[in-house]
């Protein structure tokens, strides 16, 4: 059984959803082979229609700021977009049900927006309820479309099968509870040869309150569902041909990486390769399930990237380079404290207490430098640290992370890397213990040129 996840651009409009139907139909035909009498699935996981989550979050902010009429107008426009796309559902009865579902969901949101406008505040709980609606309606719509195209599908409410912790907007899936729920609700559907269609990104805590897994979290949903159901493959269908050697929005001559190890894919996703949510690989590693990234806009010509525990050796040390902008560096200096027992522990506890994760870390005898993405709690963090150290922060920084299993075997790689980027000032430099990545922190304004130079120097040769 495979899990097929379709991202926002893959379900953005009617023609995108038509492509999804043919991709699912083809997968179904492969499954129903005489030699596989116990075939099942696939399980389909879908994101919100492209751009819908951004719109919903904007509407929530608008409502919280008291602009109830503006929020309502935007909700009606978004509802109209969904109803227009729902025209793809050809069976009249099914279409009526899908349309009613969409109207009800947006009607609920209008009432919520009205209440939030009066309160003048959007709590994390309501923000999650609003954001989740994108996937809840898109999955219902895709289920209806598959059904009316002759593919026996059943909509599954993600809030009934993905059980999470309580942290809104970054809710951790709870594997035992999610496995139980999937076994109870999805297994019987698979056993009766139906195609379950689930919204990604969305779950609910043990009390049934709606949660979400964080931006880009539909990949993570697919991986969790795949791992809990012991899938044979997790497919991430998106708008590019696979994992590329660099961010195609910055570098033009990128190539598809045909095969990545789990460790390489995790590093790339963590350091900014948006095509995979950073947590996607972790459930797959646990069950050793291959992950494949494929292009839904060119299904007839599937290049794709296969991600497995190990990959065949390549003659290139560097596999791909990831990058992230909007990074802040925090320097913590203490001549008194640094060598004293427990100082580092204390520093990291402060970040942890404020739910802020640290990406890159470097130390000297008197200072520790860390990078953070999320600066929401930085003022409180800095205030706490200032009790024991001098703290400075610098924003508008970027991370460039060169990744490759082959870096371990090339002791001169760092010197070649530094040579390639020339005189660009480097704020931080770190090499992980596994020597699978080398991470540079630079000014955002230097990102494009550094990324191009690194890519041209190390990724120009065709990958095998
Ligand atoms: P989806 O909606 O399918 O989840 P995303 O927008 O989340 O798609 O991810 C796909 C996008 O990730 C691509 O369109 C591309 O611009 C971006 N991206 C950034 N870095 C990479 C990379 N190294 N390889 C592939 N895509 C990347
Ligand atoms: N729709 C959500 C987002 O835009 C989740 C996803 O697309 O993976 O973040
Ligand atoms: Mg995504």
Image: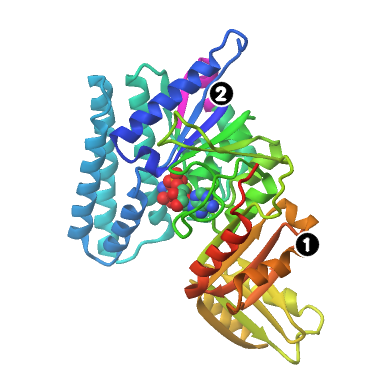
What range is drawn magenta here?
185-197
Vertical side of 204 occupied by 438: above or below: below
Question: Which comes before the other along the chain, label 1 or label 2?
Answer: 2
Residue 261 image-quadrant placement: top right
Which is nearer the eye, 238 or 226? 238
Q: Nearer the viewer, residue 417 or 399?
A: 417
Whether residue 206 is visible here, answered yes or no, is no
Residues 258 and 236: in front is: 258
Query: Residue 339's spot in the image, x, y percent?
Result: 80, 84
Of badges 1 and 2, the one in the foreground is 1
Extreme-top residue of the structure: 34
Q: Is residue 246 left or right of residue 149?
A: right
Q: Which residue is mark 2?
A: 187
Up-down relation of residue 40 to residue 361 (above or below):
above
In this rendering, position of residue 312 left or right of residue 214? right
Quarter of the picture holding the N terminus: top right
The residue sitting at 52% across, 22% down in the picture is 41
Please tell me how crowded label 1 is: few (under 14), some (14-19), or many (20+) other residues with Cα within 10 Å.
few
Name the residue furthest bottom: 336
Residue 152 in the magenta stretch? The answer is no
Which residue does the numbered mark 1 point to in the structure image? 433
Q: Where is residue 274 shown, x and y percent of the image?
A: 50, 53
**Which corner quadrant holds the C terminus?**
top right
Question: Where is residue 263 drawn, in percent x and y?
Answer: 69, 49
**Mark 2 closeness class: few <14, some 14–19, many ≥20 residues within 10 Å:** some
Q: Residue 10, relative to residue 388: is it above or below?
A: above
Left or right position of 21 against 13: right
Q: Is residue 196 on the magenta stretch? A: yes
Q: Is residue 58 something one can see in this rendering?
A: yes
């Amino acid at each position: 059984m495979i899990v097929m996840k379709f991202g926002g651009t893959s379900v953005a409009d009617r023609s995108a959803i038509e492509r999804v139907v043919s991709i699912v139909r083809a997968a179904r035909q492969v499954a129903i082979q005489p030699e596989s009498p116990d075939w099942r699935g696939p399980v389909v996981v879908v994101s919100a229609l492209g751009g819908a989550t951004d719109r919903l979050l904007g509407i929530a902010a608008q409502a919280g700021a008291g602009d109830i009429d503006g929020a309502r107008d935007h909700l009606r426009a978004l509802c109209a977009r969904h109803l227009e796309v729902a025209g793809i559902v050809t069976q009249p009865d099914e279409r009526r049900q899908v349309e009613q579902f969409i109207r009800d969901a947006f009607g609920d949101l209008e009432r919520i927006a009205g209440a939030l406008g009066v309160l003048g505040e959007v709590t994390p709980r309501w923000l999650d309820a609003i954001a989740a609606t994108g996937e809840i309606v898109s999955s219902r719509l895709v289920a209806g479309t598959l059904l009316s195209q002759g593919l026996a599908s059943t909509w599954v409410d993600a809030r009934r099968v993905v059980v999470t912790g309580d942290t809104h907007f970054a809710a951790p899936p709870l594997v035992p509870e999610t496995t139980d729920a999937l076994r109870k609700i999805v297994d019987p559907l698979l056993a009766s040869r139906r195609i379950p269609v689930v919204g990604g990104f969305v779950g609910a805590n043990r009390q049934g309150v709606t949660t979400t897994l964080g931006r880009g979290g539909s990949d993570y949903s697919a991986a969790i569902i795949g791992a809990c159901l012991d899938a044979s493959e997790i497919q991430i269908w998106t708008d590019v041909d696979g994992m590329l050697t660099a961010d195609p929005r910055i570098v033009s001559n990128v190539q598809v990486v045909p095969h990545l190890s789990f460790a390489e894919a995790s590093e790339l996703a963590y350091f900014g390769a948006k095509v995979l949510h950073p947590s996607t690989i972790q459930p797959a590693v646990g069950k050793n399930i291959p992950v494949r990234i494929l292009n839904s806009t060119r299904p007839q010509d599937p290049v794709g990237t296969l991600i497995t525990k190990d990959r065949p050796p390549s003659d290139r040390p560097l596999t791909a380079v990831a990058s992230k902008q909007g990074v802040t560096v925090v320097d913590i200096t203490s001549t008194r404290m640094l060598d004293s027992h427990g100082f580092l522990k204390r520093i990291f506890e402060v970040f942890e207490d404020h739910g802020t994760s640290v990406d890159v870390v470097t130390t000297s005898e008197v200072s520790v430098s860390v990078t953070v993405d999320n600066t929401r709690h930085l003022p409180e963090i800095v205030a706490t640290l200032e009790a024991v150290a001098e703290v400075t922060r610098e924003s508008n920084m970027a991370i460039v992370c060169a990744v490759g299993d082959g870096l371990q075997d090339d002791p001169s790689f760092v010197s070649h890397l530094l040579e390639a980027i020339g005189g660009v000032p480097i704020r931080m430099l770190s090499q992980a213990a596994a020597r699978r990545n080398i991470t540079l922190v630079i000014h955002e304004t230097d990102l494009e040129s550094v990324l191009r130079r690194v890519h041209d120097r190390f990724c120009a040769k065709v990958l095998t």
